[in-house]
Image (cartoon, rainbow, N blue to C red):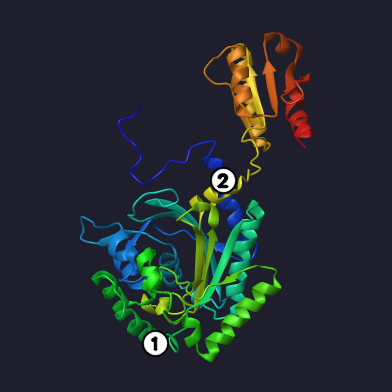
């Protein structure tokens, strides 16, 4: 046993379980790549003010959960707690919005960090795949992203997730709602911290998960009753477009997201098989975020889907992903001459695009064949001194048990033909 363990609230991804994570990341990103989204990767840490301004100084993420630190040079940095602010910062820094092709469509995959109380589905280090469409105000863009996420989950075989949808209004209609909500909240029996939060961003109180708070919010004013005509029309168009695409959703007038930058369209993907951590992903429109972090006005929309929670949702539904074996051919050599020759053939097979492994460590035939079985390879190539004298190797089909002598010079072609 090592002296060290993974830090509390984190995890290691190791084979074969890690293959499931890779498959989920691939499935989520595949629809995005087909829809014109290009890959972006940002540093694991940023200027702490990027998140304070963008995510919101009143949010739990910034006040309680962010890993912030000061470098030896005096820079104040934070491990990224979410992806949108970083991706938008990168797009602005590279002037992608000035290249004349808006929206700028980007997708990303990576690790994020929040200091939270660890539990199943909630980690201090977690993985997400996200997408951002920057620089266009169009309900079709909001609908596109919701549809792409739905397609990703369907492609994995998930069936029991729900899409919750709401509109948070904009700078025209939200101020009047904010005042109405604050007036309502001031009349409740709330603790001092919650009342302070209500004065900074009252929508955050609606997202409070405590039962005693939610009980008092039953009659809270709803944003949908305060939407301006433009926001109503925008939201109805989003609803119409995703309905026409066959995507089923639920209107949730109390849905708010945990970040301050959201406007208009907001949505969440939830799975009821995960207990208290039911949200597997979510997102929405954030038309003012660019200006918050010092950029020009760039209306944008995006989402992030949790890889960890998606894996838990698959397990809750009993969905087994079709993950191909990592090895197609396993080579077993008996004797030094055979080892040298077969190792060369392994290199040739790999160069020809065949996933091939080799029995390392000088094991005998019995131990090497056990390794071949464990590898999951479809074929095993076995060669000894007698085989080499005849100019052949033995090609064994691990499913049928059938074994065939194949000329050494024709091994690569024979393997490729059988795998095809």
Q: Label 2, secondary structure: give it.
A: helix
| Quadrant of residue 36 within the rendered picture | bottom right
Which residue is drawn at the image coordinates 69% and 22% (left, top)? 381
The disc label shown at residue 92, or none: none
Front one among 264 and 73? 264
Q: Position of residue 172 (x, y in %)?
A: 44, 89
Point 54% across, 56% down: residue: 272
**Residue 134 visible, this orientation:** no
Expressed as whole percent of the image width and height from the top left, the position of residue 268 reads 52, 66
Q: Is residue 91 above or below residue 70?
A: below
Indicate which disc residue 315 carries: 2
Answer whether residue 198 is visible to the viewer in this image: yes
- Which of 116/83 is in front? 116
Question: Is residue 387 toward the left or the right of residue 134 in the image?
Answer: right
Q: Which mark is residue 175?
A: 1
> Could you say whether the residue bearing mark 1 is in a helix, strand or loop?
helix
Vertical comparison of 360 with 267: above or below? above
Residue at x 48% of width, y 56% of height: 128
Q: In the drawing, does residue 338 fall left or right of residue 410?
A: left
Q: Residues within 10 Å of mark 1 (few under 14, many from 20)?
A: few
Counting from the top left corner in percent of width and height, residue 157 is at: 65, 52
């Amino acid at each position: 046993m090592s002296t060290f363990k993974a830090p509390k609230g984190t995890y290691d991804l190791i084979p074969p379980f890690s293959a499931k994570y890779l498959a989920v990341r691939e499935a989520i990103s595949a629809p995005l790549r087909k829809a014109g989204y290009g890959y972006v990767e940002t540093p694991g840490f940023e200027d702490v003010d990027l998140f304070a301004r963008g995510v919101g100084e009143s949010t739990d993420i910034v006040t309680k959960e962010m890993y912030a630190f000061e470098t030896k040079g005096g820079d104040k940095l934070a491990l990224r707690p979410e992806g949108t602010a970083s991706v938008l910062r990168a797009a602005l820094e590279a002037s992608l919005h000035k290249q004349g092709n808006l929206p700028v469509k980007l997708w990303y995959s990576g690790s994020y960090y929040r200091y939270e109380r660890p539990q199943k589905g909630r980690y201090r280090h977690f993985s997400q795949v996200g997408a951002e469409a920057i620089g266009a105000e169009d309900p079709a863009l909001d609908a596109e992203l919701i549809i792409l996420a739905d397609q990703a989950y369907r492609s994995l075989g998930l069936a029991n997730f729900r899409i919750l949808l709401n509109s948070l209004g904009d700078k025209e209609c939200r101020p009047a709602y904010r005042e109405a909500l604050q007036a309502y909240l001031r009349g409740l029996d709330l603790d001092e911290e919650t009342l302070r939060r209500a004065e900074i961003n009252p929508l955050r109180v609606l997202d409070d998960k405590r039962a005693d708070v939610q009980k008092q919010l039953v009659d809270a004013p709803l944003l949908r009753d305060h939407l301006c005509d433009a926001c109503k029309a925008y939201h109805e168009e989003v609803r119409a477009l995703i309905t026409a695409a066959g995507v089923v959703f639920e209107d949730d007038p109390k849905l708010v997201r945990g970040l301050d930058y959201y406007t208009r369209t907001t949505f969440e993907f939830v799975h009821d098989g995960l207990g208290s951590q039911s949200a597997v992903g979510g997102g929405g429109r954030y038309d003012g975020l660019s200006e918050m972090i010092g950029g020009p006005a760039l209306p944008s929309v995006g989402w992030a889907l949790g890889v960890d929670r998606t894996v838990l949702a698959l397990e809750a539904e009993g969905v087994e992903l079709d993950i191909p074996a990592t090895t197609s051919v396993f080579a077993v050599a008996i004797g030094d001459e055979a080892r040298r020759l077969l190792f060369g053939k392994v290199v040739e097979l790999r160069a020809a695009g065949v996933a091939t492994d080799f029995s390392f460590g000088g094991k005998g035939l019995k131990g090497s064949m056990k390794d071949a079985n464990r590898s999951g390879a479809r074929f095993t190539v076995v060669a000894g001194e007698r085989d080499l004298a005849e100019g052949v190797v033995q090609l064994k089909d691990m499913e049928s048990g059938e074994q065939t002598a194949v000329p050494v010079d024709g091994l690569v072609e024979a393997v490729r033909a059988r795998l095809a």
